[in-house]
Image (cartoon, rainbow, N blue to C red):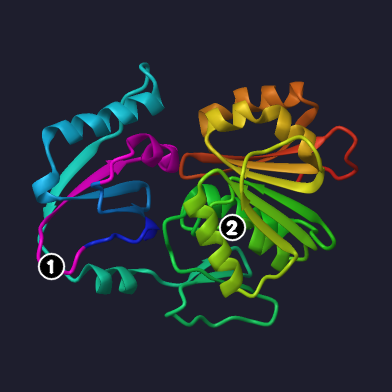
Amino acid sequence: MGPYWKPDMPSTPSDWIDVRILSCPAASEFLGLLDDPDVGGVWEDGESLHLYWPTLRWSSERLDRVRLTLRRLRGEEQLLPEIRIDSLPHQDWNRQWAESVKPLRIGRRIVIRPSWEAAEVQADHVEIVLDPKQAFGTGHHATTRMLLEWLETLALDGATVLDVGTGSGILAMVALRLGAVRAVGFDDDPVAVECAQDYARDNRFGEELTLGCGTLARGERFDLVLANLDAATLTSLTDELAVATGRRLLVSGLLVDQRGEIAEGFARAGLYQGGVRELDGWTAVEFLRADACDGPES
C-alpha cells in the first residue's frame, strides 16, 4: 500500500467509512480539490484510492462532494470512476498501518523502505529511508515508479537536477544517489516541503540538495528536469519547464490519452518527444532540447 498520509485515526473506539474510488486519476489534485478537513486518512492501494471518514461525519452530502470533485477532474464527457463504500469497525489502525508498509524495490537497484523495516541491499544499491507522511511520492504509485525506473537508466554523473512538484523529494534524492551533483526540488505545498526536508535529513543529504516552497520561475537551466504533475499543471508550466531544461525533461502524471496534447505544447516550446513509458494506464514522457547531443532513452 502507498499512503498519501498516515491515517490520523484516534485511539478511542470509533467506526469508519471507507470510500474506495477505483482508477482515480490525478489523486493528489483530487485531494486538494476535495479539501475536506474531516477526512481521517487517505491511502492508495494499487489502482484504488481509499478515503476514511468517521461514521458519525459521513453523509450523502459528502458523497455528492466526492462525485462533484471527480467530475471537475474528469470533465463532463468522461464517465466517473466506480465508487465503493464500506463500513469498518474500530481497529488498531496504527499497528495495521505500520505492518502494511514494507520495503519497496524498484528497478534493479532502488530500495525504498520505512525506518522500522530492514532490507537487504548490495553495495551498488540506492537505499532511501522514507516513512510515509502527508506528502505525495512514496514510489508505490505508477507515476513515481516510472520516473524512478527511468532515472536508473540515465548517466547522471555530474548532472544538475530540478524536481518540480517534488512532494516527498524522492526523485531528487534518488537522482543524487545515482550520481547527480546537485538537485533542487520545490513544491507549492508547505506540508510536503516540510516532509521532504525531514526525509533529506533522515537520509543524510547536505548542501547538494535544496528543497523549498515556491513556484517555477525563469532562470537557471538544469541538465535534467523532473515533473510528476497532472496534465493541467504541466500545460500551464510548459514554457517555464522548457526554459529550465538544459538537456532532458521527464514528465509523468499523465493518462495515456493526454500525451499527445502535452507533446504538442512542448514541441512549440522547443522540446521534442523522446522515449515513452506506460504503466497501469499512466504514461511518462521524455522531452529533449533540439540541440541536445543525447538520443532518446526508452
Quadrant in which the N terminus appears: bottom left
144 within the magenta span: no
Q: Secondary structure at mark 1?
A: loop
Q: Is residue 106 visible?
A: no
Which span is picked out in magenta?
10-37
* Residue 85 coordinates in the image, percent (x, y): 16, 44
Q: Is residue 101 visible?
A: yes
* Residue 166 coordinates in the image, percent (x, y): 59, 51
The outermost residue toward the top is: 77
34 within the magenta span: yes
Query: Earlier along the polypeptide chain: callout 1 or callout 2?
Result: 1
Residue at 12 percent across and 38 percent down: it is 59
Q: Which residue is mark 2?
A: 169
* Residue 152 coordinates in the image, percent (x, y): 69, 60
* Residue 122 coordinates in the image, percent (x, y): 64, 82
Above or below: residue 252 compared with residue 45: above
Residue at 80 percent across and 58 percent down: it is 155
Q: Nearer the viewer, residue 230 or 287?
A: 230
Left or right: where does residue 125 sit relative to residue 12? right
Q: Which residue is mark 1?
A: 12
Q: Amino acid at mark 2?
A: Gly
Viewer-side label of 1, 2:
1
